[in-house]
Amino acid sequence: MTTRSLFPLLALVLSVGALSPGLQAAARESAPKLISTTGAGARWKDVAEMKRMAQAGDAEACLEMGILEENGGEQPPDYIEARIWYERAAAKGMAEADFRLGKLVSEGLGGSENQEVAFQHYMKAAQVGIALAQYNVGAMLASGRGTRRDYVEGLAWLIVATRDAAVDPEGERQLRGHLARRPGDITAAEKRAERLIAMLADRKAKADGETAQPARR
């Protein structure tokens, strides 16, 4: 099988619903989390209050406004507005917004399609541990979409994404099969995946430590 025929099959994961049914529940544990606007513990009493908080610069409210505009409700989806809110949330460090913005940009929803920019957003989300973004980074590296093709780095990110059964491992299996005659590349990817996992754990530990620090007076 040629590279051209194989790697269009290594599709991006764009939502939890895109996964195989048996892994959807596990994926929800690592997928971007939606912040409830109606359930117990909501930070706002209604959409109007949420929008006011978003307009005032609240990062979580910006993310939720983007989700609201992307999914629609009583009104049709507004992908242009969704992009605007996601961009604001992403600028404030919301990795979920980067993942969702990558999806819109990669599909050309609400603006031009740009695979290079989509890759950058997915990478930001991948580097803070979002498994679906890690899969997309691996898939794009393996197929050369939005970035230079790199089978070793691509397989490494696919290994990272699928290590906890959070994402369907089919993409990893496909790429391993393609590299079967290049065992050195597979070994290099596995070692690179170990380094990525250690890096992600270190970043998480540092972030948790910063969160736990008492506020300075």
Image (tube, rainbow, N blue to C red):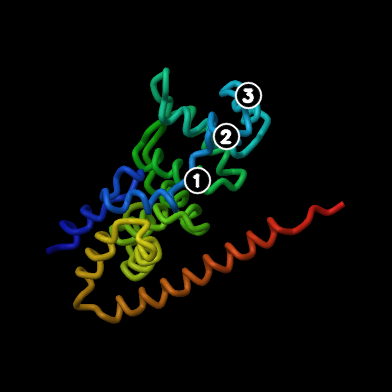
**Which percent across, then down, holds residue 80?**
45, 28
Quarter assignment of residue 203: bottom right
- Type of the residue with mark 3: Glu
Quarter assignment of residue 156: bottom left
Residue at point 19%, 78% (across, down): 181
- Type of the residue with mark 1: Glu
Query: Which residue, given by chain and number where applicable, does mark 2 sit on?
Result: 40
Q: Which mark is residue 8?
A: none
- Type of the residue with mark 2: Ala
Residue at point 39%, 63% (across, down): 164
Q: Is residue 26 left or right of residue 42?
A: left
Mark 1 or 3: in front is 3
Query: Which residue, given by chain and number where applicable, does mark 3 sit on?
Result: 49
Nearer-N-terminus badge (2/3) = 2
The quadrant the N terminus occupies is bottom left
Nearer-N-terminus badge (2/1) = 2
**Which percent across, then down, holds residue 207?**
63, 59
Q: Which of 73 and 94 is in front in this view?
A: 73
Rate crowding at label 3 as few (under 14), some (14 to 19) or many (20 or more) other CA atoms within 10 Å. some
Quarter assignment of residue 73: top left
**Which percent across, then down, holds residue 70?**
43, 31
2 and 3 marks in contact (CB < 8 Å): no
Q: What element carries label 1?
A: helix
Distance Cα–Cα, label 2 vs label 1: 21 Å
Residue furthest toward the right? Answer: 217
Vertical comparison of 73 with 184: above or below: above
Q: Is residue 152 left or right of residue 69?
A: left
Query: Which residue, given by chain and number where applicable, does mark 1 sit on?
Result: 96
Q: What element carries label 3?
A: helix
Q: Is mark 2 on a helix, strand or loop?
A: loop
Distance Cα–Cα, label 2 vs label 3: 16 Å
Rate crowding at label 1 as few (under 14), some (14 to 19) or many (20 or more) other CA atoms within 10 Å. many
